[in-house]
């Protein structure tokens, strides 16, 4: 797909804000150095962010003899963002300030048999109302609500096309939610939410190429390529959980056999345990979270069954990760989401060892495999970040019609524009056109 100048301008706006969040307070000069954009472009983008009240001027930097440099910082109170993590068994909602600090949390359980779209929407709406009340912010101050829902999502239409665990098909989720939540809604799935969280705030920050392996009930790989989230042509990139790991292997709910997910997703891990030790007290047949928690505790205590199950799971996982390393040659592979967080270092150690046996030496030599450093629910944080990106993108869309009108062929203003001297540097000035900010 062709990248338009508006896409590039939006990507540059993300990059500048990302750097401001990471470095606050910081100067335009420092931002230009960090992003590789021209000082004029950075100045224009900083001006836009100041107009939006997302950032604020915070004084001057001492400089040895030269002109003092103005400093800017994120205006944490400039607005609020909400991230919603709809999972198979729960809804987590977090409300953030603009520096992405959590101000309030709420949680609702989704019990088996209560996963009809209307039931899930009611849970989400109740939790969103609670975080807004708890944080004491006016609804109008919420710039957007990012919603992560499992499965395939059409971001443009807001339709949850397919959620296999609930047998949802073409649910108009954004329309259903917008009847209850009166703020801009941005839908996507946990893969992309986790990848964006790592890109802005976690282990992928500053890396051009990264893979964020999402280990939960479902499994997938969020892809960061060339410093930006890779969505693919129909927002379906990263469905690595449904690539075949074992020919004629376990039946997957996607209809195929032997998918990665059936060996390393939480139900797959339960099956690994069941096959090794059918009567293990670690097994909580109807409860994925309790089983994974029990395994994590037993591994820490040196229980041989748990050690073996985590090792087997890591071997399956590593074979799949080695494919990603060989295919994409990433700088970093991040293990994210609740299963990775609970199994932690013991899983990571086994995965590193097993990937080294499977991946080619050259691509692997430049790849680090790490656990997500994001301290909060990465899906909520990522969903809120998608809402932030949505708010930043909307700036471009609001200003676009004006720009188009000004240069409409044959119009008086187009003639005037042609005759006029060069305008103030645009955010995608000639020096920056055709590329986005390189990562640092
Ligand atoms: Zn599958």
Image: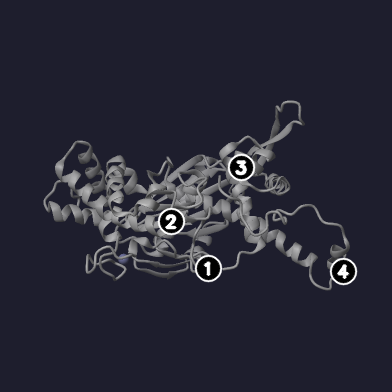
Label 4 belongs to which residue? 412
Quick one: label 4 or label 1, which is nearer the N terminus?
Answer: 1
Quick one: label 2 or label 4, which is nearer the N terminus?
Answer: 2
Counting other residues with Cα less than 10 Å from the Cα at mark 4, is it few (<14), some (14-19), or many (20 or more)? Answer: few
Q: Residue at x 64, y 37 (%)?
A: 73
Q: Is residue 246 above or below residue 331?
A: below
Which disc, if any, is residue 34? 3
Give the spatial CA distance, label 1 vs label 2.
21 Å
Q: Is mark 2 within 8 Å of ligand 1?
A: no
Residue 318 percent across, percent down from the top left: 30, 53
Q: Is residue 293 visible?
A: yes
Label 2 belongs to which residue? 222
In the foreground, 303 or 384? 303
Q: Is residue 359 above or below residue 102?
A: below
In the foreground, 421 or 331? 331
In the foreground, 279 or 198? 198
Give the spatial CA distance, label 3 vs label 4.
40 Å
Q: Is residue 404 above or below residue 382?
A: below
Counting other residues with Cα less than 10 Å from the Cα at mark 1, is it few (<14), some (14-19), or many (20 or more)? Answer: few
Residue 142 percent across, percent down from the top left: 58, 49
Counting other residues with Cα less than 10 Å from the Cα at mark 3, is it few (<14), some (14-19), or many (20 or more)? Answer: some
Which disc, if any, is residue 127? none
The reply, left or right, for residue 351 in relation to residue 230 is left
Label 1 belongs to which residue? 157
Q: Is mark 1 within 8 Å of ligand 1?
A: no
Give the spatial CA distance, label 3 vs label 1.
36 Å
Q: Residue at x 53, y 52 (%)?
A: 227
Figure quadrant of the N terminus:
bottom right
Q: Residue at x 25, y 52 (%)?
A: 315
Residue 307 percent across, percent down from the top left: 19, 44
Q: Can you tell which quarter of the image residue 399 is in?
A: bottom right
């Amino acid at each position: 797909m062709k990248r338009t100048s508006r896409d590039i301008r939006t990507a540059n706006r993300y990059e500048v804000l990302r750097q401001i969040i990471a470095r606050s307070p910081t100067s335009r000069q420092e931002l230009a150095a960090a992003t590789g954009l021209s000082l004029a472009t950075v100045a224009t983008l900083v001006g836009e962010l100041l107009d939006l009240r997302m950032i604020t001027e915070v004084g001057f930097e001492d400089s040895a003899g030269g002109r003092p440099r103005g400093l800017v910082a994120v205006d944490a109170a400039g607005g609020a963002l909400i991230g919603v993590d709809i999972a198979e068994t729960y809804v987590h909602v977090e409300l953030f300030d603009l520096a992405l600090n959590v101000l309030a949390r709420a949680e609702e359980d989704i019990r088996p048999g209560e996963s009809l779209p209307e039931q899930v929407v009611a849970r989400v709406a109740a939790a969103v109302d609670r975080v807004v009340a708890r944080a004491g912010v006016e609804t109008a101050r919420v710039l957007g609500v990012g919603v992560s829902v499992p499965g395939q999502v059409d971001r443009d239409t807001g339709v949850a096309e397919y959620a296999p665990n609930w047998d949802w098909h073409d649910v108009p989720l954004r329309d259903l939610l917008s009847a209850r939540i009166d703020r801009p809604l941005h839908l996507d799935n946990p893969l992309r939410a986790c990848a964006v969280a790592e890109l802005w705030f976690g282990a992928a920050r500053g890396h051009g190429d990264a893979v964020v392996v999402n280990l939960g009930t479902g499994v997938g790989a969020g892809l960061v390529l060339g410093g930006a989230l890779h969505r693919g042509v129909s927002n379906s990139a990263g469905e690595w959980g449904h690539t075949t790991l074992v020919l004629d292997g376990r039946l997957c709910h996607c209809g195929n056999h032997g998918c990665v997910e059936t060996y390393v997703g939480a139900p797959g891990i339960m099956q690994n345990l069941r096959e090794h030790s059918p009567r293990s007290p670690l097994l909580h047949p109807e409860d994925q979270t309790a089983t994974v928690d029990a395994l994590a505790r037993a591994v820490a205590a040196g229980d041989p069954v748990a050690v073996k199950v985590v090792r087997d799971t890591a071997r399956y996982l590593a074979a799949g990760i080695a494919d990603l390393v060989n295919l994409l040659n990433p700088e970093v592979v991040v293990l994210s989401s609740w299963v990775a967080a609970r199994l932690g270092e013991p899983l990571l150690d086994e995965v590193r060892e097993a990937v080294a046996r499977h991946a080619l030496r050259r691509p692997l030599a430049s790849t680090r495999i790490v656990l997500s450093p994001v301290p909060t629910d990465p899906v909520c944080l990522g969903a809120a970040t998608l809402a932030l990106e949505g708010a930043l993108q909307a700036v471009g869309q609001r200003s676009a019609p004006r720009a188009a009108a000004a240069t409409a062929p044959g119009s008086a203003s187009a003639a005037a524009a042609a005759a006029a001297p060069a305008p103030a540097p645009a955010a995608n000035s000639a020096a920056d056109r055709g590329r986005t900010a390189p990562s640092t």
